[in-house]
Image: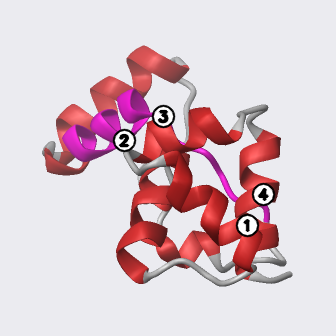
């Protein structure tokens, strides 16, 4: 799958229009239309903006054989906070969210 097909796939997976994608990526809609019409991959800065809009990394964008997991902004913030917690607080948070029978931390 080429870059443009991947952009379309990710856009369609979310049920977004071209207008919505351009808005989420904060790029002009004409830029997106130009990518499609000319069938040329976007420049790196545009691709990064598109990936940010999709909530994925560039690495995830290029993973074709694995399903890309979409992480919301709230989920990303939770992960960032979780990673800074000491182990005891991580355990307490997991117990709260998953119940006290959750698996041990790795």
- Is label 1 or label 2 in front? 1
Instruction: Name the residue nearer the viewer: 58 or 27.
Output: 27
Can you identify the residue that label 4 sits on? 8
Can you identify the residue that label 2 sits on? 76
Question: Which is more N-terminal, label 4 or label 3?
Answer: 4
Relative to residue 25, is residue 86 drawn left or right? left
Q: Separation of disc 2 and disc 4 at Cα?
A: 24 Å
Question: Which is more N-terminal, label 2 or label 1?
Answer: 1
Can you identify the residue that label 1 sits on? 36
Relative to residue 70, is residue 88 drawn left or right? left
Q: Secondary structure at mark 3?
A: loop
Mark 3, residues whose alpha carbon is within 10 Å: few (<14), some, or many (≥20)? few
Relative to residue 34, is residue 81 drawn left or right? left
- In percent of width and height, residue 42 lies at 54, 77
Q: Which residues are magenta?
A: 67-82
Relative to residue 86, is residue 100 drawn left or right? right
């Amino acid at each position: 799958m080429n870059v443009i097909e991947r952009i379309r796939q990710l856009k369609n997976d979310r049920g977004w229009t071209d207008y919505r994608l351009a808005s989420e990526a904060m790029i002009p809609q004409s830029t997106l239309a130009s990518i499609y019409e000319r069938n040329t991959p976007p420049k790196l800065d545009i691709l990064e903006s598109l990936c940010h809009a999709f909530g994925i990394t560039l690495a995830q964008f290029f993973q074709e054989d694995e399903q890309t997991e979409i992480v919301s902004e709230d989920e990303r913030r939770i992960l960032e906070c979780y990673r800074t917690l000491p182990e005891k607080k991580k355990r307490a948070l997991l117990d709260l969210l998953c119940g006290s029978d959750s698996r041990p931390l790795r």
